[in-house]
Amino acid sequence: MYGIIKIIKNNNLRAFVWCDLIGGCWVLTRQGPTKKKKKKKKKKKKKKKKTKNTRENKQGKLDKEEKEAWKINLTKLKMNHLDPEDAIFLVDAFLDECKVDQHGQTKGGSKQSTKLCVWPDEDKDGQPLPKRCRAGEKRKRDSATVSSASVKSVSCAPSTSTTEDTVIIENFDSLIQDVRELLGSGDEQSFPSEWSNRQTTSLENWTVMRPFMVNNMLSSEKPKEGVCHHCGHKAAVVMCRDCLPRSLYCTACDLSTHEALVLHNRASMVEGFFRQLQPSTFVQQHEGGKFSYHEKDCMLPIVPPCCDCSTGQTSFSKGKPVILIGMNGRYNLFLPSVNCSCGKTLPVTISDLVESGYWPATVNFETLYMVDLFTTYEDLKITAPGMSRQAFVSMLECRTKLFGRSGKICGDTMQRAFLEWAYAKFEVDKLSQVQHFQCPACTPSMLAVAVDGNRKLYRFKSQPGPDGFFDGVFLANDADVSSFVDYIHETTGHNPGKGRCGAGQWTAARESANKSGSKLDEEGVEVAVCRHGVLLKGLNMFRGEIFAYPLYLQKQLASQTVQFFCSDVVCKYWPYLQKVVGHCPELEDLLNMRPFLSIMHAKAHSWMCELKWGGRNQEGAGTTIGEEVEQVNSFLSRAAICSKYMSKAVRTDMLTIQASGWNKRKAENLDRTLAKRYIKTVQRIAEATKDLEKLTTELSLQQDTVQQWVSDVQQWTSGATIQNDLQRTIEGLYLGIKQRKFQLYRQSGGNKRRHQLRRKIAVEKKALEVAINDHNATVGEVEKLPPPNELLAVDNYSWPWECHGDMERKKNVFDKVMLLARLKEEEFIVVREVKQHMEYMRSVAGLIEEFTFQLTEDTTGKCSTEGLMEKGREGLLCVLKRRLREVEAQLAKARTTYKCILGLQTLPLDDFSEEEDSENTSSTDEELGE
């Protein structure tokens, strides 16, 4: 950092302060004009050759009398560790000293030294030592931090010491030149950021420490010689890192302590190295100091069942063998048999195991899984959807061997038990008022829903099996979808060909298609999401992307009062919907939604199609892009590598679990998402306003002219254009290549399919080049088209046979006006969604409190929990209390975020309790957004 930091004025003294690139601080002082002094000496020695001292100000050059009054001092201060605030403080003290020296010379006429601000002492870092505080003034600093070596509050004391270098320059021009050379010398350096400094320091530290870390790792492999940490007098022979800090055991203490702690990972030290021990293995010492290994029976640690007798004294004995699988692998244990002193033998039931944190693989519970294993597996499947079950099981087997145990783990059994656990957890969540597939910010009024297919989530044919646990929860029941599609096809006469936009074809724009003859069962999934990326509904595709699939999803979501229906081929889907409604009047309510062409997909449509159907031109849509489903598909596509080999039921269940996990993360971060969207919208409104004003100024347009141009563009899209065969061919090839490039990785799941698409693109490029040459040979210079590469680099190219006169210029103004209008709408929409989010969470909290009250007061057990036993009802009350606490914490967090972002410290969102129409609340919500 360099440049002038501050200009300090002190009576007739002025100082300019700047920093150079090596951390020093330069001070340039000037003594202002003074009255003419009487000549104290008759004659002076011959002065040096005068030079012109210039200074740019309002009056131009200084007069001769003012030039003679200049006194230039350039002092280099040692401030390698001072920040600019400290430097400015020292300059204040420096000017005070100059003032004192000047006053003394004027008043007393004593001959003082011309050396300025000389520090008598320095510390070990070369910093001036503080002497005294400035009288009548306190040092104020904003956020600078000063080390112990820095100056805190000092003032310069006059001294005659010569320890500091002082340079007195009388020639102002030469001084300015020296300073310019100083600031401009060498290449301009860019100072590294704090993060870069930390990374560099960390890398250097690790480079130095790397040899020591290797030595430390080797030394940690040597067994520790010492006494037992528990008895304190016997030699330690076993080490258990799960028992840190008291990790060393003798033979007796190890046997007594780990009889109950069978899941600890121990290692023997008697052989001169760490040998991992199974839970059933223990070390025994013989006479002569020899050691041997022996086996014992280890029982599963559980919460023991209670006997109804009065004594309550129980003992444990070995029961049937049981396999326990956790995050550290497999354990071979025995199920305990509980014997009471009254003579009863208490069996261990499934309820005892679930209470102890285990989940049975079968009803006979010969294999058990820790619940912690399932929660970890679920989190991994959501965070890394492409991780396979077999990879997870292989990791568990490796950890089994690492700790000295043995045994295989069955992946099919673990998957079945996991799905059983996930379904039970889903039912508990349903009772605790958890809605997995509902967006809090879109309830009860949803602005837009985006629908699109994912061809990567196909599945190979396999033997039919039972239905999944979550059939119909997220993915619709296949029989219901099939019957609806057949009904639509039988009722309406359908066209089996591909849909066209202008002269381009869309594979997704088909009314019907036959089932694929390949070795596939499901060919993909079709999903619907809201504008916040929350998954709402989905279905399996068996005939590719036909219009009947989004029609089914639109029918399912019609009850949520959706305003816009977003699709990448809505320009062809909406006429199809109007035709279907003509044959099926019961679907007439679907036309209450408004069509919305996705923003990015519109780039591959014709220009007139984008103007008519594009989302940026739809009034009331805000800045909805309609591409939110692409973000979700990128998440779901990562699961395709595993789901294509699953059975039908498992695929449905796993996709449902992953979708609900995705929605959970979206709901937890919804307050931050809306807050960031609001801030970004406000910033973009200011930018868009400036851009529009700049464009209208450049074009010299008045407000009425701008509105007329917008109207001209809107009317132009409704007009018909006449094209010849060559023009239609060029436009079709252009759109076809753009669409294939867009679908290259989106719809293709393998290199083979992508290779085929690239070959088609190359062939169409050559055909486009030939067509362009033929067109340019028959038209004038103005109407000629650029080469194919330049043409394809432009989105929505304005064809000369469509865009006449100044229509392209009008469209630029039209786009700016539409963008500004959508941004202003978005500001209102986000505030409304904030309101709905807060009201949704408050309503959920109210439902939980009401349900808790009903369970507490209901003694007959008929409060919608007929299937629960007494202990189950008591557990449900505890779950509801925990759920209420979580909702209240989330509500408080969201309230804090919204107050900080929207500026609602004095106007709480809780005051809004009733849903109002947008026209009636527009002024209120706009005030909230200010």
Image (cartoon, rainbow, N blue to C red):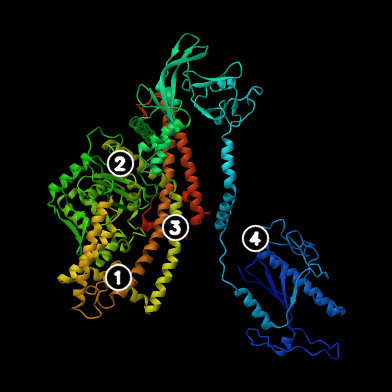
Query: Label 3, on which residue?
Result: 678
- Can residue 569 be seen? no
- 878 in relation to 743, above or below: above
Q: Quadrant of residue 103?
A: bottom right
N-term mark: 1 or 3: 3
Query: Label 4, on which residue?
Result: 142
Q: Are marks 4 and 3 in contact (CB under 8 Å)?
A: no
Q: Quadrant of residue 416?
A: top left
Which amino acid type corresponds to the residue marked 2 in the rendered image? Ser
Q: In whole angstroms, how far apart are the C-alphas of marks 1 and 3?
A: 37 Å
Q: Are marks 4 and 2 in contact (CB under 8 Å)?
A: no
N-term mark: 4 or 2: 4
N-term mark: 4 or 3: 4
Q: In whole angstroms, how far apart are the C-alphas of marks 4 and 3?
A: 30 Å
Secondary structure of the residue carrying tag 2 is: helix
Q: In whole angstroms, how far apart are the C-alphas of marks 4 and 1?
A: 54 Å
Determine which of the numbered discs, if any, sits on residue 790 in the image: 1
Q: Nearer the viewer, residue 722 or 871?
A: 722
